[in-house]
């Protein structure tokens, strides 16, 4: 592509994945954020729960000073506490929804431009009951977000049989779910991730074309799924080009081409596409981040 990627996208990065020790809402959040805010490559940062109100205030101020945007990820709030918004136990389902509502409060406090979450695990014999529980919870989440402002809410599509084993899930369920929610809520959409598509056993065409009208956010990442014995197997988001992994320059270029084909990336409205990459073993965050930037630069040349 001869035109700058800036004409089509805002490049973001997920802070609590790129830097270890932040996912619980504590740790060196401000120190890590400062490294991203000082890097002009990034226009968006994605964060999750921040327990200290003073740190939240400082995060908002730093993001505003850097002329960036912020997305709030509610996924870790569920995953770290073992909560499931499609739990068939009503009390547990309610606790999961309340956890996300608290996340929505923080997202508005941080002036976030988006909020994301995920569906939980399920049993095959009660899949439809879990689907209806997910609809019930998602309605509550969208209504709550709408009551406080205009921040979009997106559900991230995960694997269903490898790692997270999420109900949403395979593309036919993602489409069915998105149709129901989008008909009722104009603040709802789907979040897709290039690292999850191979885990779903679907091609780019199979995964993205059926849900193209519902995609409101996108991630770029990598995965290892060839053999459970390989390092970083599962939903661990290793750097691009990691041994035995699925995604590198050419695969990222194909993903970006598909995002353009379906209209998510276009020259009329710059859309957010964020890196979800994580250091493995003794790898340093800064080097993994540089890997991601180089990979995207090279991939864009192929778009």
Image: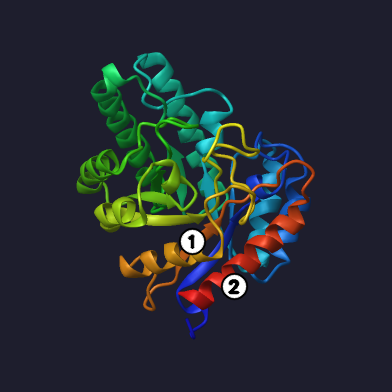
In-front residue for pair 221/62: 221
- From the top left corner, tell me how far across and down residue 250 is, in percent: 51, 65
Specify which label sits upstream in the sequence, 1 or 2: 1
Q: Which quadrant of the figure has residue 170?
A: top left
Whether residue 115 is visible: yes
Colour mapping? rainbow
Q: Which mark is residue 251?
A: 1
**Where does label 2 land, which residue?**
297
Q: How many marks?
A: 2
Q: How many C-alpha atoms fall within 10 Å of the one at disc 1: few (<14), some, or many (≥20)?
A: some
Residue displayed at 36% across by 49% down: 190
Whether residue 34 is visible: no
Tell me: 25 left or right of 251: right
- From the top left corner, tell me how far across and down residue 199 is, in percent: 44, 41
The secondary structure type at the circle numbered 2 is helix
In-front residue for pair 81/287: 287
The secondary structure type at the circle numbered 1 is helix
In-front residue for pair 147/286: 286
Residue displayed at 62% across by 51% down: 277
Tell me: 257 left or right of 185: right
- From the top left corner, tell me how far across and down residue 14 is, in percent: 60, 51
- From the top left corner, tell me how far across and down residue 87 is, in percent: 38, 20
Tell me: 95 left or right of 35: left
């Amino acid at each position: 592509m001869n035109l700058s990627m800036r004409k089509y996208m805002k490049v973001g990065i997920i802070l609590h994945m790129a830097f270890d020790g932040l996912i619980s809402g504590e740790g060196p959040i401000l120190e890590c954020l400062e490294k991203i805010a000082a890097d002009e490559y990034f226009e968006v940062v994605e964060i999750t729960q921040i327990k200290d109100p003073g740190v939240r205030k400082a995060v908002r101020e730093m993001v505003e000073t850097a002329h960036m945007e912020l997305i709030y990820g509610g996924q870790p709030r569920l995953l770290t506490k073992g909560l499931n918004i499609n739990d068939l136990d009503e009390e547990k389902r309610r606790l999961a929804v309340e956890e996300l509502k608290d996340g929505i409060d923080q997202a508005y406090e941080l002036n976030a431009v988006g909020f994301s979450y995920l569906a939980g695990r399920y049993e095959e014999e009660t899949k439809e009951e879990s689907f209806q529980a997910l609809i019930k919870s998602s309605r509550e989440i969208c209504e709550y977000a709408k009551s406080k402002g205009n921040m979009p809410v997106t559900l991230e599509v995960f694997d269903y049989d490898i790692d997270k084993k999420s109900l949403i899930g395979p593309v036919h369920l993602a489409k069915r779910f998105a149709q129901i929610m989008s008909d009722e809520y104009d603040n709802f959409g789907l979040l897709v991730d290039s690292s999850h598509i191979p885990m779903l056993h679907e091609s780019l065409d199979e995964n993205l074309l059926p849900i193209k009208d519902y995609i409101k956010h996108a991630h770029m990442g990598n995965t290892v799924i060839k053999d459970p014995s390989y390092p970083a197997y599962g939903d661990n988001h290793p750097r691009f080009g990691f041994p035995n992994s699925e995604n590198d320059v050419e695969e990222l270029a194909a993903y970006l081409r598909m995002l353009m084909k379906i209209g998510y990336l276009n020259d009329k409205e710059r859309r957010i596409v964020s890196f979800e990459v994580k250091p493995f073993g003794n790898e340093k965050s800064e080097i993994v981040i540089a890997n991601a930037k180089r990979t995207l630069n090279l991939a864009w040349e192929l778009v």
